[in-house]
Amino acid sequence: MFFRLADQHRLLVQDLVMNLQALAIVLEKRGYIASCYTCGGQMSSASFMVSLGEGHLIRFLVSDYGITWTEMRDDRELMKLEGAEAISQLQELANLVKTQQPSFVAIA
């Protein structure tokens, strides 16, 4: 059972990394400063960042150690979420991109 869960977790992380890379590309094409860096070729971790303007920054980290969403404004942390809550916030950001909102607002 635990080997199966470990494999599922690895697949989840790889899927998140691929989706973060795609989201960064879409955001860049829409004029936002966005990046997604991965470590190694196994896609086992990534650091995603996007500037939403006026000192508003989103950072999403994913690795074998955990998943975190951090939202900052003017270098001050507004919100930090982990695990499923972090992924839900990422979905909210992706939904905003899908509906082509002209500007993002704090999701908190």
Image (cartoon, grey):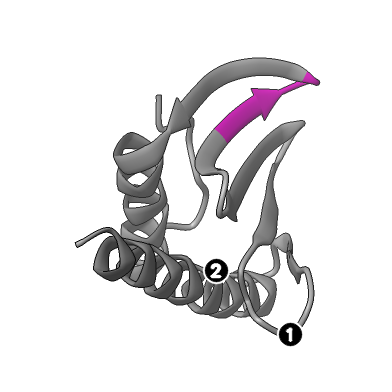
Amino acid identity at mark 1: Gly
Whichever of callouts 2 and 1 sits on the residue coming sooner in the sequence is 2
Which residues are drawn in magenta? 70-75
Residue 70, position in %: x, y? 59, 32
Q: Dividing the picture into quarters, in which one does residue 71 lie? A: top right
Residue indicated by mark 2: 20
Q: Quadrant of the N terminus?
A: bottom left
| Magenta segment main secondary structure | strand
Q: Residue at x 34, y 70 (%)?
A: 98
Q: CA distance from mark 2 to mark 1?
A: 15 Å
Amino acid identity at mark 2: Leu
Q: Nearer the viewer, residue 99 or 7?
A: 7
Q: Residue at x 32, y 35 (%)?
A: 85
The secondary structure type at the circle numbered 1 is loop
**Callout 2 environment at 10 Å: few (<14), some (14 to 19), or many (20+)?**
many
Q: Is 30 left, or right, of 47 in this rendering?
A: left
Residue 3, position in %: x, y? 32, 67
Q: Residue at x 65, y 43 (%)?
A: 59
Residue indicated by mark 1: 41
Give above or below for 58 relative to 23: above
Residue 28, position in %: x, y? 69, 73
Q: Nearer the viewer, residue 77 or 103?
A: 77
Q: Dividing the picture into quarters, in which one does residue 30 lie? A: bottom right
Give above or below for 78 relative to 2: above
